[in-house]
Image (cartoon, rainbow, N blue to C red):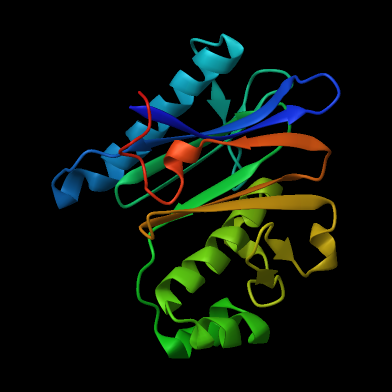
């Protein structure tokens, strides 16, 4: 069952610019989980392309370490999946999305993964696992939009979670970020080029998670 998380529209024309969909990943044996998660994310993408852009047979290409690209003029996509959840972002502008489940991170590893201010913020947080997931998904969403992935300097690109989240590195000045926490079980972050959008969140997939959303 696919759910809408948020939609972005051009403020002047009200044309749909981007949308994020979520779906639950069925339970599976450990040996099958990675494959099932990947297939579920691709199925979600196919449904999104059909619903929003009338594309029934989307084609994706990837060269070397470059990010996967849709072979359809003017359209962009990005996928993510984590324990129990798959996410697909589609639109007319470049985008990067990451979904994670809060999980323990060893304190001694934080200086390798986060900048000094981020590390201090995580250590001071009431829920360290959740704060780390908020920061990490923002880093991943940026890297996935640019195509650099984890090749970016994780310690130099510091983020400040909030409404909206902010990247403190000047290289991200032309970008904007959106983030949602679903029931303290999943964190989803989206990165898109900066623009004057009308953004609509689906309130049924707010902190209560997915169970109350429409099919």
Q: Position of residue 164 (x, y in %)?
A: 69, 57
Q: Quadrant of residue 116?
A: bottom right
Q: Residue at x 83, y 40 (%)?
A: 195
* 187 shown above or below 74: below
User: Seen from this angle, which residue lies furthest left?
Assistant: 29
Q: Does residue 48 lie above or below 113 as drawn?
A: above
Q: Nearer the viewer, residue 24 or 96?
A: 24
- What x and y, as percent, mark residue 11? 82, 28
Residue 87 visible here: no
Quadrant in the rendering for residue 66: top right
84 on left or right of 191? left
Quick one: quadrant of the C terminus? top left
Relative to 175, 132 lies left or right: left
Q: Residue at x 65, y 77 (%)?
A: 155
Q: Quadrant of residue 1?
A: top left
Is residue 130 visible from the viewing direction of this image?
yes
């Amino acid at each position: 069952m696919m759910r809408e998380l948020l939609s972005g529209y051009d403020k002047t024309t009200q044309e749909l610019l981007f949308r994020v969909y979520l779906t639950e990943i069925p339970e599976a044996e450990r040996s099958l989980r990675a494959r099932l998660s990947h297939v579920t994310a691709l199925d979600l993408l196919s449904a999104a392309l059909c619903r929003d852009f009338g594309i029934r047979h989307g084609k994706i290409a990837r060269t070397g370490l470059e990010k996967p690209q849709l072979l359809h003029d003017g359209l962009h996509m990005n996928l993510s999946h984590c324990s129990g959840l798959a996410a697909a972002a589609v639109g007319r502008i470049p985008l990067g999305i990451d979904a994670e489940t809060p999980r323990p991170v060893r304190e001694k590893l934080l200086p390798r993964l986060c900048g000094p201010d981020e590390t201090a913020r995580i250590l001071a947080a009431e829920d360290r696992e959740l704060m780390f997931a908020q920061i990490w998904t923002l880093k991943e969403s940026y890297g996935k939009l640019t195509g650099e992935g984890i090749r970016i300097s994780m310690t130099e690109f510091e983020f400040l979670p909030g409404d909206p989240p902010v990247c403190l590195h000047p290289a991200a000045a032309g970008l904007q970020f959106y983030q949602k926490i679903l029931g303290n079980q999943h964190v989803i972050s989206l990165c898109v080029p900066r623009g004057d959008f009308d953004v609509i969140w689906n309130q049924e997939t707010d902190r209560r998670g997915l169970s109350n959303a429409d099919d």
